[in-house]
Amino acid sequence: MNLTSRARRLRRDSTDAEHALWNVLRNRQLDGRKFRRQTPIGRYIVDFVCMEQRLVIEVDGGQHQEQTLQDEERTQAIESEGYRVMRFWNNDVLSDLDSVSDAILMELERRPSP
């Protein structure tokens, strides 16, 4: 399955946490910034990306506790493409969406690295 097909499937099958965060990010609701979801970058598909600010948002479930090495490699590969990466746990998104949104806003206010 190619990346485009996989991204389409991931959009259709989003988790509750991804769905909740997408409701905040979609339609330029957060600081007027356009976000895309389940977008290919390099060989990976990222959960959310603001291309203008080159900011990637990843929402991680419990399985990520056991794959920290893979997540670090993934983050390094995405950063090597010129993006900043923020990671949040599913339960943080679901239990404290306001704090997650505030953290993303603070990162958006920073200048993107060259």
Image (cartoon, helix red, strand yellow):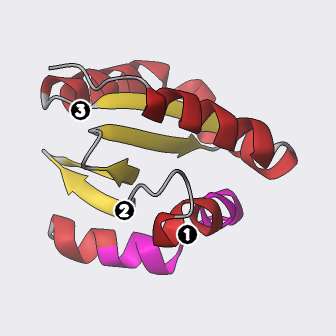
| In the rendered image, the vertical position of residue 45 relative to residue 105, given as above or below | below
Residue designated by label 2 = 38
Q: Position of residue 93 (x, y in %)?
A: 73, 46
Q: Name the residue beneath numbered marker 3.
A: 78
In the rendered structure, does residue 10 fall within the stretch colored magenta? yes
Callout 1: helix, strand or loop? Answer: loop
Q: Verify whether residue 55 appears in magenta.
A: no
Q: Is residue 98 left or right of residue 107?
A: right
Residue 85 visible, this orientation: yes
Please report the residue visible at 76 percent of the width from the left and 36 percent of the height from the top.
Answer: 99
Pinpoint residue 77: horizontal percent, then vertical percent. 20, 27
| Whether residue 92 is situated above or below residue 37 in the rendered picture | above
Return the x and y of residue 36 as percentages of the image width and height.
36, 63
Q: Residues within 10 Å of mark 1 (few under 14, many from 20)?
A: some
Q: Amino acid at mark 2?
A: Gln
Q: Which residues are magenta?
A: 8-21
- Separation of residues labelled 3 and 1 (CA atoms): 21 Å
Please give the name of the residue rendered at 52% of the width and 50% of the height, measured from the top-left corner.
31
Kind of residue at badge 3: Ile
* Secondary structure category for the residue under label 2: strand
Looking at the image, residue 56 sits to the left or right of residue 107; the answer is: left
User: Left of 32 or right of it: where is 18?
Assistant: right
Which image quarter holds the N terminus? bottom left
Instruction: Write the residue at 45% across / 35% down.
Output: 108
Rendered image: mark on residue 88: none
